[in-house]
Amino acid sequence: MSLTYPIATSAMLAISDPAGAARIKSDAELAANGQVIIGLVTEWLKPDEAGLEAIRAQAQAGPGNGFIQFYEDTDGHPTLAVTFWKLDPVAKPEPKVRPSVEDQPPIDEQPDHTDDLYFKQVRTGKKGKSAAADPNQLDLFSSSEP
């Protein structure tokens, strides 16, 4: 199962109330309904141990997959690394629409020249003179018997 990251303005919102989830930035921009995506960011949280199970349950119930990692700091307290698509809270949303297949221009049928890129020279399998056989080596494939 591939990683999917929630879309939110902060790490706590990414866990509790994300605006969706996406694997790549273009999908995140479409799911964000025109809001500006700053990028894929990682924020660190230090929740208290009482709220840790609630955070785990929210992360499992959310649309993201594999976006949260659980660590311990040097004192043994839980620390979370939350990776999410960060929305810009200030920018004005511009709705984006994915172009449909019908709207794209047809691809002209052209001959495929891929073979020309790789096979410009005719190869015979021989390169120069072969080395002379060692007279001390036993020939295992000769038709004559010793």
Image (tube, helix red, strand yellow):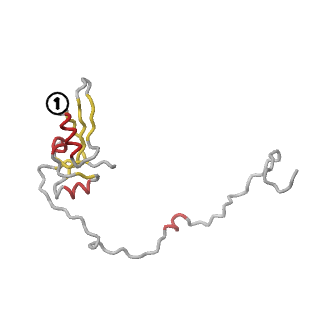
Please give the name of the residue rendered at 19% of the width and 62% of the height, measured from the top-left corner.
96
Please give the name of the residue rendered at 25% of the width and 43% of the height, measured from the top-left corner.
83
Residue 15 is left or right of residue 109, and the answer is left
- Image vertical order of residue 71 relative to residue 36, above or below: above
Q: Quadrant of residue 35?
A: bottom left
Q: Quick one: label 1, few (<14), some, or many (20+) residues within 10 Å?
A: few
> In x, y percent, where is residue 122?
62, 66
Q: Which amino acid, by three-letter code, is at mark 1? A: Ala
- Image vertical order of residue 107 relative to residue 50, above or below: below
- Image vertical order of residue 126 relative to residue 61, above or below: below
Please give the name of the residue rendered at 81% of the width and 55% of the height, measured from the top-left corner.
142
> In x, y percent, where is residue 9?
16, 46
Residue 2 is left or right of residue 58, and the answer is right
Please give the name of the residue rendered at 28% of the width and 73% of the height, measured from the top-left corner.
102
> In x, y percent, where is residue 8?
17, 47
Task: Determine which residue is flagged by label 1.
Answer: 50
Residue 114 is left or right of residue 71, and the answer is right
Secondary structure found at label 1: loop
How many circles with numbers are drawn on the protein? Answer: 1
Which is more toward the observer, 17 or 94?
A: 17
> In x, y percent, where is residue 84?
23, 45
Q: Residue furthest top?
A: 75
Q: Quadrant of residue 56?
A: top left
Which is more toward the observer, 122 or 85?
A: 85
